[in-house]
Amino acid sequence: MAVTDFVTIHRHLFEGQRAHPEATGELSSLLGTIALACKIISRNVAKAGLLDVLGATGGINVQGEGVMKLDVLANEALAACARYNGLVAAIASEEDDDIVVMPSASGKYVLFYDPLDGSSNIDANIPIGTIWGIYKRTSTGAPTAADFRQAGTEIVAAGYALYGSSTMFVYATGGVAAGFTLDPEYGEFILSHPNIQTPDRVKCYSMNERNAAAWPAGAQTFLSELKSQEPRYAKTTARYVGSLVADVHRNLLYGGVFLYPEDAGSPSGKLRLLYEAIPMAYVAECAGGAASTGRERILDMTPEAIHQRVPLCIGNQREVARYEALRAAKNES
């Protein structure tokens, strides 16, 4: 590809903004800021073994999970970029107990994120990611937790970064999802996946089958169907990384479904609604897919708390709908 063919993320944002004369450029600026933070995180991930940032800090976050050193660095990178952007009134992160008010407390947006999804895989050099979403704030005074308790349908933009064999940055806004690959030579995110559309096939399914015995009956039946030899599933294979970003990204590109239902150990589900399920659901829907708890569309939900957990089925529309039908047939509503 010639240099003149490059569409950087900044050019892509500018061209998208130019198509909407009413746009102020503020959202484009914020998206560029998030992309910068993900570049910083990517650099730290790539050099983790050399920078002595592998392993755990010894701390426990609000989730009751061990905090990895890279979790802290990623959280600080996103917070710092949001702090100095001037457009973010408050942030909510997996690593913080409560919302954090920014110096620009009158900013137009609130930002929420999982700074390093799949961080338990860090030391094994398995792909990990960052998940983020943006709402317009609803408060008129100081930002509050209510700014984050909005229905998923109110999301302005969302996306993720995947730190794997290459670093990818995917963002969705206005009903379109696009992917960019970080060119390490130029230090730029270059458009590599315009208008992502998930195929209507099931090349792979992603779930922790080890827990299947504790799943609801509808989820067990769904797994049995995916493993069957009926024509639609005859060539379907199991692919489970254990990192939400990596599993969902692969399935969006190849066609497939990710499932993490509630079980006996996690009756409310395991994944976080605000900064994991809602952003990934928005990207999936913009790419022609769907996301559900098995009983309810994810984007129709309103978080009751910053760290609320939910079950998640996300992938192509037909399989998500089939999962909902099986749960309904078992009266698991």
Image (cartoon, helix red, strand yellow):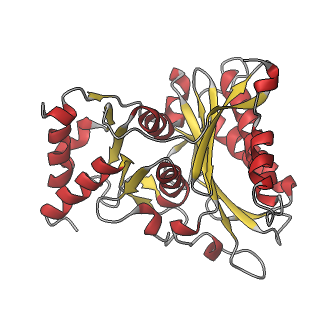
| Closest to the observer, 34 or 145 | 34
| Closest to the observer, 170 or 200 | 200
Image quarter of residue 210: top left
Relative to 71, 289 lies left or right: left
Q: Quadrant of the C terminus?
A: bottom left
Residue 61 position, x and y percent, is 57, 50
At a point 61% along the width and 60% down the height, the residue shown is: 97
Answer whether residue 137 is visible to the viewer in this image.
yes
At a point 43% along the width and 35% down the height, the residue shown is: 247
From this view, report whether residue 131 is shown above or below residue 24: above
Residue 273 position, x and y percent, is 48, 59
Residue 17 position, x and y percent, is 78, 54
Q: Quadrant of the N terminus?
A: top right
From this view, report whether residue 287 is shown above or below residue 186: below
Residue 16 position, x and y percent, is 74, 50
Q: How many marks?
A: 0
